[in-house]
Image: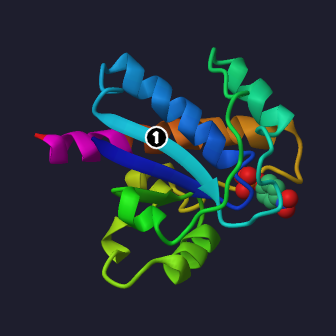
Amino acid sequence: MVKVLFVCLGNICRSPTAEGLFRDLLRRHGLDDRIAVDSAGTGAWHVGSAPDRRAQAATLRRGIDISNLRARQARADDFESFDYVVAMDRENYRDLRRLCPPGREDRLHLFMDFAPRAGTRDVPDPYYGGPQGFEDVHGLVEEASAGLLDHIRRNLE
Ligand code: 4NP
């Protein structure tokens, strides 16, 4: 089993959206029995909370229900249990780099690096903005998810 962990700041907007979309993508490719997905936040403010209602709504519009997810904080031992620890933006990446045990740095990735043609290195934080921000998250997550899945499949073969 290959294990993927998506990480943002709060684990209530971007990373649960990525978890839901990526899990749906795996199901459609028949790979959900070979690749497992989870998400976490670098911060602890929202631990135990369901995803933000706006993230739930934007995801449900695409037929994906993420209401059952609950926020948790990323831990150093996530770098032992997950093959891919995927940061939503460069700030998350820096925070995770600090959390990462020595020798596990190769497991840390910046999500948008899997979509070099998207023209951005960050999935922008939509929390303080309007509904369009949540739509934008979906576009970026879809692009980077396709690239990440290609990358994992090449390494599965
Ligand atoms: P996320 O969005 O990192 O995509 O889950 C945020 C959610 C909450 C906060 C910041 C970002 N906050 O400061 O509470």
Badge 1 density bin: few <14, some 14–19, many ≥20, Cα 10 Å = some
- Which of the 4 quarters of the picture holds residue 66? top right
Q: What residue appears at the point 57 percent right and 48 percent down from the top-left corner?
A: 39
Say what secondary structure mark 1 lies in: strand
Give the percent coordinates (x, y) of residue 57: 79, 25
| Three-letter amino acid code at the position of disc 1 | Val
- Identify whether 62 is placed above or below 147: above
Going by the image, does 64 lie left or right of 110?
right
Main secondary structure of the magenta stretch: helix
Determine if residue 125 is in view: no
Determine if residue 138 is in view: yes
Q: Which quadrant: the C terminus? A: top left
Q: What residue appears at the point 27 percent right and 41 percent down from the top-left corner?
A: 1
- Identify whether 50 is placed above or below 91: above
Q: Nearer the viewer, residue 110 or 133?
A: 110
Going by the image, does 29 lie left or right of 23?
left
| Range of magenta residues | 148-156
Give the color scheme: rainbow, by chain, secondary structure or one colour. rainbow
Q: Nearer the viewer, residue 119 or 2?
A: 2
Give the percent coordinates (x, y) of residue 137: 66, 42
Q: Is residue 153 magenta?
A: yes
Q: Nearer the viewer, residue 3 or 64?
A: 3
Q: Nearer the viewer, residue 134 or 99?
A: 99
